[in-house]
Protein backbone atom coordinates (compact mmCIF):
# COMPACT_ATOMS: atom_id res chain seq x y z
CA UNK A 1 0.00 0.00 0.00
CA UNK A 2 1.48 3.35 -1.05
CA UNK A 3 1.69 6.32 1.28
CA UNK A 4 -0.68 8.36 -0.94
CA UNK A 5 -3.26 5.59 -0.99
CA UNK A 6 -3.09 5.11 2.80
CA UNK A 7 -3.53 8.85 3.34
CA UNK A 8 -6.55 8.87 1.02
CA UNK A 9 -8.10 5.97 2.95
CA UNK A 10 -7.59 7.75 6.28
CA UNK A 11 -9.16 10.90 4.83
CA UNK A 12 -12.18 8.98 3.53
CA UNK A 13 -12.62 7.24 6.89
CA UNK A 14 -12.46 10.56 8.70
CA UNK A 15 -15.15 12.02 6.43
CA UNK A 16 -17.34 9.00 6.99
CA UNK A 17 -17.03 9.32 10.75
CA UNK A 18 -17.75 13.05 10.67
CA UNK A 19 -20.81 12.76 8.45
CA UNK A 20 -22.03 9.69 10.34
CA UNK A 21 -21.81 11.60 13.59
CA UNK A 22 -23.64 14.57 12.05
CA UNK A 23 -26.45 12.31 10.87
CA UNK A 24 -26.76 10.67 14.28
CA UNK A 25 -26.82 14.05 16.00
CA UNK A 26 -29.43 15.34 13.55
CA UNK A 27 -31.89 12.61 14.58
CA UNK A 28 -32.90 14.03 17.96
CA UNK A 29 -35.33 11.93 20.01
CA UNK A 30 -38.47 13.57 21.38
CA UNK A 31 -40.76 12.13 24.05
CA UNK A 32 -43.34 13.91 26.14
CA UNK A 33 -46.50 13.12 28.11
CA UNK A 34 -49.49 15.30 28.94
CA UNK A 35 -52.53 14.54 31.12
CA UNK A 36 -55.75 14.40 29.06
CA UNK A 37 -59.28 13.37 30.03
CA UNK A 38 -60.55 10.09 28.59
CA UNK A 39 -63.01 12.10 26.47
CA UNK A 40 -60.71 15.09 25.95
CA UNK A 41 -59.67 16.62 22.63
CA UNK A 42 -56.24 16.43 21.02
CA UNK A 43 -54.99 18.13 17.83
CA UNK A 44 -51.98 17.09 15.75
CA UNK A 45 -50.36 19.05 12.90
CA UNK A 46 -47.44 17.51 11.00
CA UNK A 47 -46.73 18.49 7.40
CA UNK A 48 -44.31 15.78 6.19
CA UNK A 49 -43.53 12.24 7.35
CA UNK A 50 -46.17 10.17 9.12
CA UNK A 51 -48.59 10.23 12.05
CA UNK A 52 -49.47 6.99 13.83
CA UNK A 53 -52.06 7.22 16.60
CA UNK A 54 -53.16 4.47 18.98
CA UNK A 55 -55.90 4.58 21.57
CA UNK A 56 -55.18 3.33 25.09
CA UNK A 57 -56.91 3.14 28.48
CA UNK A 58 -54.98 5.99 30.13
CA UNK A 59 -55.88 9.64 30.70
CA UNK A 60 -52.56 10.61 29.17
CA UNK A 61 -51.16 11.63 25.79
CA UNK A 62 -47.75 10.26 24.88
CA UNK A 63 -45.83 11.56 21.86
CA UNK A 64 -42.61 10.09 20.52
CA UNK A 65 -40.63 11.21 17.48
CA UNK A 66 -37.23 11.29 15.85
CA UNK A 67 -36.59 14.83 14.70
CA UNK A 68 -34.38 15.85 11.81
CA UNK A 69 -32.11 18.85 12.24
CA UNK A 70 -34.13 22.05 12.21
CA UNK A 71 -37.40 20.37 13.27
CA UNK A 72 -39.08 21.01 16.63
CA UNK A 73 -42.22 19.75 18.37
CA UNK A 74 -44.41 22.16 20.33
CA UNK A 75 -46.96 20.62 22.66
CA UNK A 76 -49.24 21.90 25.40
CA UNK A 77 -52.76 22.38 26.70
CA UNK A 78 -55.03 21.45 29.56
CA UNK A 79 -56.78 18.35 30.89
CA UNK A 80 -59.81 18.76 28.60
CA UNK A 81 -57.92 19.72 25.46
CA UNK A 82 -54.36 19.84 24.16
CA UNK A 83 -52.50 20.17 20.88
CA UNK A 84 -49.13 19.69 19.24
CA UNK A 85 -47.46 20.71 16.00
CA UNK A 86 -44.13 20.24 14.25
CA UNK A 87 -42.26 23.42 13.35
CA UNK A 88 -39.42 23.64 10.82
CA UNK A 89 -36.64 26.16 10.34
CA UNK A 90 -37.41 25.97 6.61
CA UNK A 91 -41.18 26.10 6.14
CA UNK A 92 -40.82 25.64 2.39
CA UNK A 93 -38.76 22.44 2.69
CA UNK A 94 -39.62 20.73 5.99
CA UNK A 95 -37.90 17.46 6.81
CA UNK A 96 -39.99 14.31 7.40
CA UNK A 97 -41.04 13.80 11.01
CA UNK A 98 -42.50 10.45 12.03
CA UNK A 99 -44.80 10.79 15.02
CA UNK A 100 -46.07 8.03 17.29
CA UNK A 101 -48.95 9.21 19.45
CA UNK A 102 -50.98 7.47 22.16
CA UNK A 103 -54.27 9.08 23.20
CA UNK A 104 -57.15 8.12 25.54
CA UNK A 105 -59.36 5.71 23.61
CA UNK A 106 -62.51 7.85 23.89
CA UNK A 107 -60.81 11.13 23.00
CA UNK A 108 -61.68 13.43 20.12
CA UNK A 109 -58.77 13.48 17.69
CA UNK A 110 -57.95 16.01 14.94
CA UNK A 111 -55.02 15.38 12.59
CA UNK A 112 -53.92 17.53 9.65
CA UNK A 113 -50.96 16.84 7.34
CA UNK A 114 -49.71 17.66 3.86
CA UNK A 115 -47.82 14.58 2.65
CA UNK A 116 -47.68 12.62 5.90
CA UNK A 117 -49.64 9.36 6.02
CA UNK A 118 -52.16 9.06 8.86
CA UNK A 119 -52.84 5.78 10.68
CA UNK A 120 -55.31 5.57 13.59
CA UNK A 121 -56.05 2.44 15.61
CA UNK A 122 -58.38 1.84 18.54
CA UNK A 123 -59.83 5.33 19.01
CA UNK A 124 -63.56 5.15 19.80
CA UNK A 125 -64.26 8.88 20.09
CA UNK A 126 -64.50 11.33 17.20
CA UNK A 127 -61.92 11.50 14.40
CA UNK A 128 -61.31 14.40 12.01
CA UNK A 129 -58.46 13.54 9.61
CA UNK A 130 -57.13 15.54 6.66
CA UNK A 131 -54.21 14.97 4.27
CA UNK A 132 -53.31 16.40 0.86
CA UNK A 133 -51.31 13.66 -0.87
CA UNK A 134 -50.86 10.99 1.79
CA UNK A 135 -53.06 8.04 2.74
CA UNK A 136 -55.45 7.61 5.67
CA UNK A 137 -55.94 4.26 7.41
CA UNK A 138 -58.41 3.84 10.28
CA UNK A 139 -58.84 0.57 12.19
CA UNK A 140 -61.62 0.57 14.76
CA UNK A 141 -65.15 1.80 15.30
CA UNK A 142 -65.15 5.49 16.24
CA UNK A 143 -68.43 7.22 17.02
CA UNK A 144 -67.71 9.79 14.31
CA UNK A 145 -65.19 9.75 11.49
CA UNK A 146 -64.52 12.51 8.98
CA UNK A 147 -61.60 11.67 6.65
CA UNK A 148 -60.43 13.56 3.55
CA UNK A 149 -57.45 12.85 1.29
CA UNK A 150 -57.04 14.97 -1.84
CA UNK A 151 -54.74 12.65 -3.81
CA UNK A 152 -54.45 9.70 -1.42
CA UNK A 153 -56.51 6.70 -0.35
CA UNK A 154 -58.90 6.49 2.57
CA UNK A 155 -59.26 3.00 4.06
CA UNK A 156 -61.53 2.22 7.01
CA UNK A 157 -61.72 -1.19 8.69
CA UNK A 158 -64.38 -1.24 11.38
CA UNK A 159 -67.89 0.07 11.96
CA UNK A 160 -68.01 3.82 12.60
CA UNK A 161 -71.52 4.95 13.47
CA UNK A 162 -71.19 8.14 11.41
CA UNK A 163 -68.76 8.29 8.50
CA UNK A 164 -67.84 10.90 5.91
CA UNK A 165 -64.90 9.94 3.68
CA UNK A 166 -63.75 11.54 0.46
CA UNK A 167 -60.87 11.66 -2.00
CA UNK A 168 -60.31 13.19 -5.41
CA UNK A 169 -58.08 10.73 -7.26
CA UNK A 170 -57.58 8.14 -4.53
CA UNK A 171 -59.74 5.21 -3.52
CA UNK A 172 -62.19 5.18 -0.60
CA UNK A 173 -63.08 1.91 1.11
CA UNK A 174 -65.08 0.75 4.13
CA UNK A 175 -64.84 -2.80 5.38
CA UNK A 176 -67.32 -3.18 8.21
CA UNK A 177 -70.67 -1.46 8.70
CA UNK A 178 -72.22 1.89 9.56
CA UNK A 179 -75.44 3.54 10.64
CA UNK A 180 -74.78 6.62 8.49
CA UNK A 181 -72.05 6.55 5.83
CA UNK A 182 -71.30 8.85 2.89
CA UNK A 183 -68.30 8.17 0.63
CA UNK A 184 -67.26 10.21 -2.41
CA UNK A 185 -64.49 10.53 -4.98
CA UNK A 186 -63.88 12.23 -8.31
CA UNK A 187 -62.05 9.49 -10.21
CA UNK A 188 -61.11 6.95 -7.57
CA UNK A 189 -63.02 3.74 -6.85
CA UNK A 190 -65.38 3.31 -3.89
CA UNK A 191 -65.72 -0.03 -2.13
CA UNK A 192 -68.15 -0.77 0.72
CA UNK A 193 -68.45 -4.27 2.12
CA UNK A 194 -68.84 -6.52 5.08
CA UNK A 195 -71.46 -5.56 7.63
CA UNK A 196 -74.89 -4.07 8.17
CA UNK A 197 -75.83 -0.64 6.84
CA UNK A 198 -78.72 1.71 7.52
CA UNK A 199 -78.08 4.91 5.54
CA UNK A 200 -75.44 4.78 2.84
CA UNK A 201 -74.50 7.14 0.03
CA UNK A 202 -71.67 6.68 -2.51
CA UNK A 203 -70.96 9.27 -5.19
CA UNK A 204 -68.25 9.51 -7.85
CA UNK A 205 -67.73 11.01 -11.31
CA UNK A 206 -65.70 8.38 -13.14
CA UNK A 207 -64.77 5.87 -10.45
CA UNK A 208 -66.37 2.47 -9.96
CA UNK A 209 -68.67 1.74 -7.00
CA UNK A 210 -68.88 -1.66 -5.31
CA UNK A 211 -71.30 -2.36 -2.46
CA UNK A 212 -71.81 -5.66 -0.66
CA UNK A 213 -73.65 -5.80 2.64
CA UNK A 214 -76.82 -6.18 4.69
CA UNK A 215 -79.59 -3.62 4.17
CA UNK A 216 -81.50 -2.40 7.19
CA UNK A 217 -85.19 -2.70 6.35
CA UNK A 218 -85.80 1.00 7.05
CA UNK A 219 -82.56 2.15 5.40
CA UNK A 220 -81.91 4.50 2.49
CA UNK A 221 -79.18 3.69 -0.05
CA UNK A 222 -78.09 6.00 -2.88
CA UNK A 223 -75.36 5.28 -5.45
CA UNK A 224 -74.41 7.80 -8.16
CA UNK A 225 -71.76 7.69 -10.88
CA UNK A 226 -71.40 9.47 -14.19
CA UNK A 227 -69.31 6.95 -16.13
CA UNK A 228 -68.11 4.39 -13.62
CA UNK A 229 -69.52 0.89 -13.18
CA UNK A 230 -71.81 0.24 -10.20
CA UNK A 231 -71.93 -3.24 -8.66
CA UNK A 232 -74.49 -3.85 -5.89
CA UNK A 233 -74.51 -7.11 -3.96
CA UNK A 234 -77.22 -7.85 -1.35
CA UNK A 235 -78.64 -11.02 0.23
CA UNK A 236 -81.43 -12.52 -1.86
CA UNK A 237 -83.78 -12.32 1.15
CA UNK A 238 -83.33 -8.57 1.49
CA UNK A 239 -86.46 -6.44 1.63
CA UNK A 240 -86.06 -3.42 -0.63
CA UNK A 241 -87.67 -1.07 -3.12
CA UNK A 242 -85.22 -0.84 -6.02
CA UNK A 243 -84.96 1.97 -8.57
CA UNK A 244 -82.06 1.84 -11.05
CA UNK A 245 -81.54 4.24 -13.96
CA UNK A 246 -78.68 4.28 -16.47
CA UNK A 247 -79.18 6.93 -19.13
CA UNK A 248 -77.03 5.28 -21.78
CA UNK A 249 -75.59 2.28 -19.95
CA UNK A 250 -76.81 -1.25 -19.26
CA UNK A 251 -78.41 -2.90 -16.25
CA UNK A 252 -77.82 -6.55 -15.34
CA UNK A 253 -80.29 -7.95 -12.78
CA UNK A 254 -78.80 -11.11 -11.26
CA UNK A 255 -80.86 -10.90 -8.08
CA UNK A 256 -84.36 -11.69 -9.43
CA UNK A 257 -85.94 -12.68 -12.74
CA UNK A 258 -87.23 -9.14 -13.36
CA UNK A 259 -85.84 -7.70 -16.62
CA UNK A 260 -84.83 -4.05 -17.08
CA UNK A 261 -86.89 -1.92 -19.46
CA UNK A 262 -85.82 0.64 -22.02
CA UNK A 263 -85.16 4.15 -20.77
CA UNK A 264 -87.75 6.90 -21.08
CA UNK A 265 -85.87 8.53 -23.94
CA UNK A 266 -85.40 5.37 -25.99
CA UNK A 267 -81.91 4.63 -24.73
CA UNK A 268 -80.34 3.25 -21.63
CA UNK A 269 -82.17 1.06 -19.12
CA UNK A 270 -84.40 1.25 -16.06
CA UNK A 271 -85.26 -1.25 -13.37
CA UNK A 272 -88.00 -0.65 -10.81
CA UNK A 273 -89.11 -3.47 -8.53
CA UNK A 274 -90.03 -4.59 -5.04
CA UNK A 275 -87.87 -7.28 -3.48
CA UNK A 276 -89.68 -9.32 -0.82
CA UNK A 277 -92.52 -6.81 -0.51
CA UNK A 278 -90.19 -3.83 -0.25
CA UNK A 279 -88.47 -2.19 2.68
CA UNK A 280 -85.15 -0.37 2.31
CA UNK A 281 -85.03 2.18 -0.48
CA UNK A 282 -82.21 1.40 -2.93
CA UNK A 283 -81.51 3.89 -5.73
CA UNK A 284 -78.78 3.73 -8.38
CA UNK A 285 -78.20 6.45 -10.99
CA UNK A 286 -75.56 6.52 -13.73
CA UNK A 287 -75.19 8.38 -17.00
CA UNK A 288 -73.28 5.83 -19.04
CA UNK A 289 -71.85 3.41 -16.52
CA UNK A 290 -73.12 -0.19 -16.39
CA UNK A 291 -75.03 -1.38 -13.31
CA UNK A 292 -75.07 -4.89 -11.85
CA UNK A 293 -77.49 -6.02 -9.14
CA UNK A 294 -76.58 -9.42 -7.69
CA UNK A 295 -77.00 -11.75 -4.74
CA UNK A 296 -74.30 -12.21 -2.12
CA UNK A 297 -75.71 -15.57 -0.96
Image: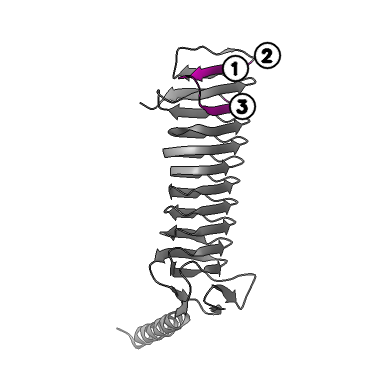
Q: Which residue is mark 2?
A: 264
Q: Badges 2 and 3: C-beta atoms under 8 Å apart?
A: no
Residue at 56% x, 36% y: name it: 207
What is the crowding at mark 3: few (fewer than 14 residues within 10 Å), some, or many (at least 20)?
many
**Residue 4's spot in the image, x, y percent?**
38, 86
Q: Which residues are magenta?
A: 268-289
Left or right: 32 with respect to 146?
left
Foreground of the two, 96 or 245: 245
Left or right: 226 with respect to 290?
right
| Residue 269 in magenta stretch | yes
Query: Which of the 4 image quarters holds residue 10?
Result: bottom left
Q: Which residue is mark 3?
A: 286
Q: Quadrant of the N terminus?
A: bottom left
Q: Secondary structure at mark 2?
A: loop
**Residue 202's spot in the image, x, y percent?**
56, 37
Q: Badges 2 and 1: C-beta atoms under 8 Å apart?
A: yes
Foreground of the two, 294 or 197: 197
The answer to whether residue 27 of the structure is visible from this angle is no
Q: Quadrant of the C terminus?
A: top left
Image height check: is 232 above or below 31?
Answer: above
| Residue 92 in magenta stretch | no
Residue at 59% x, 76% y: name it: 88
What is the crowding at mark 1: few (fewer than 14 residues within 10 Å), some, or many (at least 20)?
many
Query: Which of the 4 image quarters holds residue 103?
Result: bottom left
What secondary structure characterizes most of the magenta part?
A: strand
Q: Nearer the viewer, mark 3 or mark 1?
A: 1
Q: Residue furthest right?
A: 265
Total of numbered circles in the picture?
3
The tag on residue 270 is 1
Of labels 2 and 1, earlier in sequence is: 2
Left or right: 128 with respect to 64?
right
Image height check: is 147 above or below 285?
Answer: below
Amino acid sequence: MTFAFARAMRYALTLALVFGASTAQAQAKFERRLPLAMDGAFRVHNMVGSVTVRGWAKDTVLVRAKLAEGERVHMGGGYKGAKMFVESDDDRHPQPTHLEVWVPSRSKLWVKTATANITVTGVAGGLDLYVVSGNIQVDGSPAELNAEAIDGDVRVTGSPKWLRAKSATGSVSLRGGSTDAALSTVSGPIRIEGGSFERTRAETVSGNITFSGQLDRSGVFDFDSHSGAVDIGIPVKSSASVAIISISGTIANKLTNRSPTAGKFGRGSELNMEVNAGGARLTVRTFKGPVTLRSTD
